Image (cartoon, rainbow, N blue to C red):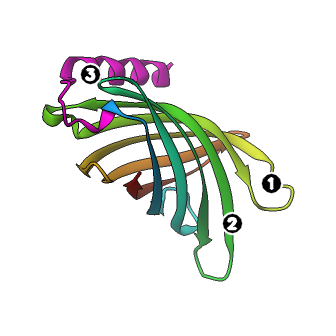
Amino acid sequence: MKKLILAFAVVGFSAMGAQAQDNAPAKKTTVSIGANIGIPTTTGLSVAYGADLQADFAVAATTKITASAGYEKYSVKGGGSTSGVIPVLAGAKFFFGEGGKMYGHAQLGYVLSTVSGGGGAFGYAPSLGYYFSPNFDASLKYLAFSKNSYTTGSVNLRVAYNF
């Protein structure tokens, strides 16, 4: 229920603050390649890093539907061991603020483990970002995945080049 309320709040806030501008990056369909690094919120992990490919499909002047897939690696504290996941996510990106450069992004999907027998889990990734230019943006993203009442997550800085 909390996630549903959060989703409605994001949509409402975005709709109130959205301003269409001729130079807003939301007016076209783009593909981006991003690299990220982060701090895990799960005990026992020391660093998270990875890359992803994302497509943003314009549906309105201030709204895009997104699809992304990537690879995220988590290092275990104490060294030596790592584990990886492949997040496959879909979502919506809402531009707000003057100039349409700031955005909120909410994604849901499935995360596949690269560990033998690891299976998959429900994934989600809310984020806030900013377009520094039409070809460059950065966002602060919380990537998490849950299975059997256990959640693994990380707060990541994603830096992307947009084509």
- Disc 3 on helix, strand or loop? helix
Q: Position of residue 64 (x, y in %)?
A: 41, 29
Toward the viewer: 162 or 85? 162
- Disc 1 on helix, strand or loop? loop
Residue plotted at (43% across, 57% down) = 156
Residue plotted at (22% across, 40% down) = 101
Q: Which residue is mark 1?
A: 118
- Which label number is shown at residue 83? 2
Q: Quadrant of residue 148?
A: top right
Q: Is residue 96 above or below residue 25?
A: above
Q: Position of residue 9 (x, y in %)?
A: 34, 20
Q: Position of residue 137 (x, y in %)?
A: 31, 52
Write the start and end of the magenta stretch as one range. Answer: 1-26
Q: Residues within 10 Å of mark 3 (few under 14, many from 20)?
A: some
Q: Is residue 100 magenta?
A: no
Mark closer to the observer (1, 3) = 3
- Which label number is shown at residue 13? 3
